[in-house]
Image: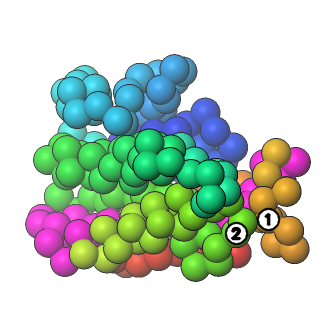
Amino acid sequence: MKILLVGAGGDVGRAIAQTLGETHTILAVGRTSGEYRADLTDDASVAALFRETGPVDAIVSAAGHLHFGPLAEMSAAQFNVGLQDKLLGQVRLALIGQHYLNDGGSITLTSGIVAEEPIAQGVNATAVNSAIEGFVRAAATELRGNRRINVVSPTVLTESLERFAGFFPGFESVPARRAALAYQRSVEGVQTGRVFRVW
């Protein structure tokens, strides 16, 4: 398969590339690094990406920024960071990408455990991740050409724990390579409209 992987330079992205790259061709995409460059917050940038790559068999997103901070101090502009980047960025990738996805192909997006397990200062993250999962469940009912769409919801990664441990007290981390298996199941499996939880 020809797999477009957005966020290939991150912790989970590298693990996905290693896992799927053993048997498939990976087109690595990043905002500032990678074989291809794209800004998911910009329609023209995403459209240009697909014009450059041409049709693909799978689209995988392991990208997206969120705002973390106390609700009492949060502004609408700060909340909008997650809406425009992680939520709409991944939705944009799916909306444009579906037209470049070969029949029988798949789209895999990323949410996170806070969709169901809120954390302090994570209101934006919970709202965004929940919305991504809702989008995937609904989009699965309308994709044509035997195309599929799923979302992977990992907990905090072991590789990222030092940076985010303060936000996830008492949460058990998982290694990125374990999370990568859920992306493999989404790409190579048969399910659609699923939330693959890696907790």
User: Is any atom of residue 186 visible in this view?
Assistant: no
Q: Residue at x 61, y 60 (%)?
A: 71
Residue assigned mark 1: 168
Checking the image for residue 119, the label placed there is 2
Q: Which of these two is toward me, 27 or 117?
A: 117
First in sequence, mark 1 or 2: give its number: 2
Q: Position of residue 18 (x, y in %)?
A: 63, 44
Q: Which of these two is toward me, 32 or 18?
A: 32
Disc 1, disc 2: CB below 8 Å? yes
- Relative placement, left or right, of 41 versus 8 is left
- Relative placement, left or right, of 169 versus 191 is right
Secondary structure of residue under mark 1: loop
Residue type at numbered disc 1: Phe
Residue type at numbered disc 2: Ile
Q: Position of residue 3 (x, y in %)?
A: 39, 44
- Relative placement, left or right, of 8 versus 46 is right
- Relative placement, left or right, of 117 versus 107 is right
Q: Which residues are magenta?
A: 139-162
